[in-house]
Every structure is written in structure tokens, then in C-alpha cells.
């Protein structure tokens, strides 16, 4: 369970305490920040990512007035167990984690793979989720999602050759606006200097890629059944999860809102964090 104390509320992700909770045979690593009480915002992270991969410029503004929780899914980072090879099983693990913390209602902030897991969770447990933020993501059976592995390996190679972070290639356009935004994003991820998370193992990453391929080739879910208030956001040139899929989800989820940022890629919300964070904060506060 969460550790409570009389110390002041932490609202900086760089200083969020590292915690753990055991449930379903797994010890889940997580961090929490922001004021307790109210409906928490649980963050669902992307492919090959651990707790250190959240942009503090997105987390901190939300944590100002919301109880924020980030976590490592099973077999990722400091969480124990073996990474599941399906999105559905990842959603089951997320449910186990959320219930272990004692929550009956949550808001979800998701990015990329996290958005797949979030959608699967809503299909299985619609009553659990009040609001849904889907960024850089797409629906089950979405066009070209099964090609993510090819794009990812190609960009990892490009990054290795230039001794840079693969996210600079995968998340951002390689142009005059994208390159500096990429460098700034990678620097922000280093702001937490102590108590950093365990790096994601190659095998975990490969298993996640298999799960993504299955998701891309699976039958579409009936998104018209989603009753949650939903905010969808992406860049206009997402090479990992094609931007057209954000429009597709917007069309299929009743009453959803769509924000597409110009001249940006998979990490559009990070490139435009100054514009996007207030949009997310306003959406969650409604």
C-alpha cells in the first residue's frame, strides 16, 4: 500500500518516492506524487520504457492538483515476473496493480503501447475508468501497427551509429524543429538523479514487440461502446503508430476530443509539452 506521512506533498516527478506493492505473484514498482484524495491519474508507459521515461513537463503540471501514479508493468524495470506476450495480459496486470492500491475508479494517461493497454483495460473493466487520455497510440487491428518492430529496429540502428538515444529518431522528426526538441526531451528524462529505475531488458522489449504485432493483427474492438470522456493527441507525422489512427479512434469513440500537433512525430506531446500539458490538465479537471 502507499506510504503516507505528514511530509509536504511531492509535486515534482524527479523527487517522487520509489514504492512497491505485491499482488498476483508480482511486485510492482511504482511512484506517486501530487495531492492524495480524489480520482488518481494512472500513467501507462510506452514500449521499452520504465518509470524514468515519463517527461516531467507532462507529469508535474498534472500532479499539481491530481494524485499521479506511474508504474512498471510485470517484467519491466524494477517490477518482477515475466513480460506477457499479449496486450490483454498486460491489461490484466495493470488491473491487478490498480486494485492492489485499493482504487475503484481511476483516470488514465497513456502513451503509445500504454494506450493499447489502456484500451484493453477499458474493454475488460469499463466501470474502473472515468477519463481516458490516449496519446501517440492506436486501436486494436490498426493499420501498420504490426510494422512497429521494423521501424523500431531500423531507428535503433540509426541511433547506435550516431551514438544518440533511439527515442530521438523514433519520437521526433529529423528536421530543424524536431532535432532540438528531441535533445531537450532526452535531457529532461535525466532530471531525476537518484533512485533511478532498473533498465528494461532486451528480452522484455522483444516480448513487448511481439505483443504489439498481435495487437496490430487482432480484431478491432467496438470503440463506440466507450463511455469515458476521451482526449486523443498525437503529432501529424507519427512513424511508429500512424497519425491517421488517432483520427480513426476519434471518429469511433463517441464525444472524444482530438489534438494533432503540426510538424511533429510520435512524441508530439513532448515536443509541444507547453501547449499540451495545459490541455491535459483542463481535460482531467473538468
Image: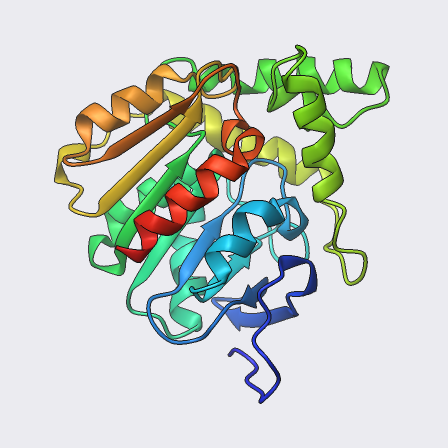
Image position, residue 78 (x, y; %): 68, 58
Q: Which residue sits at x=75%, y=39%?
A: 187
Q: Which residue sits at x=63%, y=37%?
A: 48
Height in image: 96 above or below 174? below
Height in image: 178 above or below 130? above
Q: Quadrant of the C terminus?
A: bottom left
Image position, residue 18 (x, y; %): 66, 67
Height in image: 224 above or below 18? above
Query: 201 and 113: which one is in front?
Result: 113
Image position, residue 281 (x, y; %): 39, 51
Query: 152 and 233: which one is in front?
Result: 233
Q: Which residue sits at x=64%, y=40%?
A: 204
Height in image: 10 above or below 137? below
Corner quadrant of residue 250 = top left
The total of numbered circles placed on residues is 0
Specify whether residue 28 is in view.
no
Query: 128 and 263: which one is in front?
Result: 263
Corner quadrant of residue 165 = top right
Specify whether residue 162 is in view.
yes
How has the structure been colored for display?
rainbow
Q: Residue furthest bottom?
A: 6
Q: Which residue sits at x=47%, y=66%?
A: 24
Image position, residue 11 (x, y; %): 57, 65
Q: Residue furthest top?
A: 175
Q: Is residue 40 left or right of residue 254?
A: right
Amino acid at each position: 500500500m502507499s506510504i503516507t506521512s505528514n511530509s509536504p506533498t511531492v509535486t515534482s516527478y524527479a523527487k517522487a518516492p520509489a514504492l512497491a506493492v505485491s499482488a498476483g505473484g508480482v511486485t510492482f514498482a511504482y511512484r506517486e506524487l501530487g495531492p492524495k484524495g480524489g480520482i488518481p491519474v494512472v500513467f501507462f508507459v510506452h514500449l521499452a520504457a520504465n518509470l524514468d521515461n515519463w517527461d516531467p513537463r507532462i507529469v508535474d503540471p498534472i500532479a499539481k492538483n491530481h494524485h499521479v501514479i506511474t508504474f512498471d508493468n510485470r517484467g519491466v524495470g524494477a517490477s518482477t515476473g515475466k513480460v506477457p506476450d499479449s496486450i490483454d495480459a498486460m491489461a490484466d496486470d495493470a488491473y491487478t496493480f490498480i486494485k492492489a492500491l485499493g482504487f475503484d475508479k481511476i483516470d488514465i494517461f497513456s502513451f503509445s503501447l500504454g494506450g493499447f493497454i489502456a484500451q484493453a483495460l477499458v474493454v475488460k473493466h469499463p466501470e474502473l475508468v472515468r477519463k481516458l487520455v490516449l496519446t501517440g497510440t492506436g486501436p486494436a487491428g490498426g493499420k501498420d501497427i504490426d510494422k512497429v518492430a521494423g521501424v523500431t529496429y531500423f531507428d535503433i540502428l540509426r541511433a547506435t551509429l550516431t551514438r544518440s538515444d533511439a527515442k530521438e529518431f523514433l519520437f521526433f522528426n529529423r528536421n530543424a524543429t524536431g532535432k532540438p526538441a528531441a535533445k531537450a526531451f532526452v535531457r529532461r528524462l535525466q532530471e531525476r538523479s537518484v533512485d533511478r529505475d532498473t533498465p528494461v531488458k532486451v528480452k522484455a522489449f522483444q516480448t513487448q514487440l511481439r505483443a504489439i504485432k498481435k495487437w496490430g493483427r487482432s480484431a478491432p474492438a467496438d470503440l463506440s461502446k466507450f463511455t469515458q470522456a476521451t482526449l486523443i493527441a498525437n503529432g501529424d507525422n507519427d512513424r511508429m503508430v500512424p497519425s491517421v489512427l488517432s483520427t480513426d479512434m476519434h471518429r469511433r469513440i463517441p464525444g472524444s476530443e482530438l489534438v494533432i500537433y503540426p510538424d511533429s512525430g510520435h512524441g508530439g506531446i513532448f515536443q509541444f509539452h507547453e501547449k499540451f500539458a495545459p490541455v491535459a490538465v483542463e481535460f482531467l479537471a473538468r
